[in-house]
Each structure stands twice: as C-alpha cells, then as structure tokens.
Amino acid sequence: MNDEVLYGLGVDINSTCTFHDGDLKLSAYDENLVQAVVNRLNTKMDSLDLFYEGYGSVLTDFYGWRGNDETIKLMKVEINNALRNESRLYGFSADINYEGEGLMRIDLTLNPDPDTSIDVGLVWNNVGELEIVDEEEY
C-alpha cells in the first residue's frame, strides 16, 4: 500500500474508548478502516440521516435469524449495499458461515487499493452488535 492510500485511511479515536498512556487510544490507517466498516455495519440505516445521508445498514436486523442459504444471501446483499458507499474501499468481499447455535461469522476482505487486502472476522455479540473476532479466542 503506498503512503497516499495509507494516509487516506485516516486516524480516529478508537471506538472502544480505551486509554493508552493516559489518553484515548487512536485507531490509525488500516485499523481505522476496519473500525469504520464495523461502525457502518452496526449503525442502523438512516439513524444518522440528519448528518450522513445513507449511512449505516440493516445488517443487525438479521441477528437471531435462522442460519440458512437464504439468510446468508440476504446478508451479503446488505453488506454490499452498506459498504459500496465507503469511499476508502477500492473493493471488498464477504464470506458468511453459520457456525451453529445461532452464531453467524462474517469474514470480510477489505481492499483499500488493488494490491492490498485486509482480512477481518466478525461475529454478533450477545446484544446483537457485530464485533471483531479475536482469532486467538475464537
């Protein structure tokens, strides 16, 4: 990834509001892109319409749905609808798998440019929000 693309991914406050050396931890570059994607998918569509028209998704509405092919297809459509508006993405792909007992896992590959891939796994937490999978715990 060249510097122009890297710096274009931006820096923001970490959405977990964790602290580092007495100050809020920052989320930078590829980590910031992942955070922005997760925030977009977790934000109810049109809930921020006053400031950001078309921001968000209805993906969290699928929480608790039966893990079948139809649900997975609908979820992929919703991910596509939500992420196609993310200006920092050159491209992306989503793989969704039913993991049993109501658990759906979403594996995203984010491409900020044609030569860079950022892989991130997501699962629903116990309140229906998507969160990043810690591969060591999963």
Image: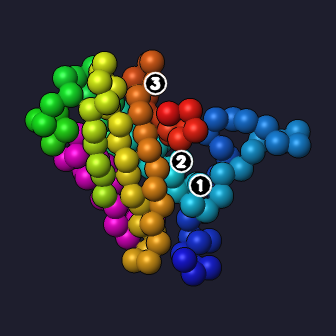
Q: Can residue 61 be seen by looking at this rendering?
A: no
- Expressed as whole percent of the image width and height from the top left, the position of residue 84 reads 30, 58
Q: Mark number for residue 46?
A: none
> Gap in Å between the C-alphas at discs 3 and 2?
16 Å
In which quadrant is the N terminus drawn? bottom right
Residue at 39% across, 58% down: 109
Neighbours of disc 2 within 10 Å: few (<14), some (14-19), many (20+): many
Identify the amino acid type marked 3: Asn
- Expressed as whole percent of the image width and height from the top left, the position of residue 90 reads 38, 70
Q: Circle 1 is placed at which residue position?
A: 31
Residue at 28% across, 42% down: 96
Q: Circle 3 is placed at which residue position?
A: 125
- Expressed as whole percent of the image width and height from the top left, the position of residue 14 reads 65, 44
Q: Can residue 130 be seen by looking at this rendering?
A: yes
- Expressed as whole percent of the image width and height from the top left, the position of residue 44 reads 36, 33
Neighbours of disc 1 within 10 Å: few (<14), some (14-19), many (20+): some
Q: Secondary structure at mark 2?
A: helix
> Gap in Å between the C-alphas at discs 1 and 3?
20 Å
Q: Circle 2 is placed at which residue position?
A: 35
> Gap in Å between the C-alphas at discs 1 and 2?
6 Å
Please give left or right for residue 68 compared with residue 39 in the image: left
Q: Secondary structure at mark 3?
A: loop
Q: Are marks 1 and 2 in contact (CB under 8 Å)?
A: yes
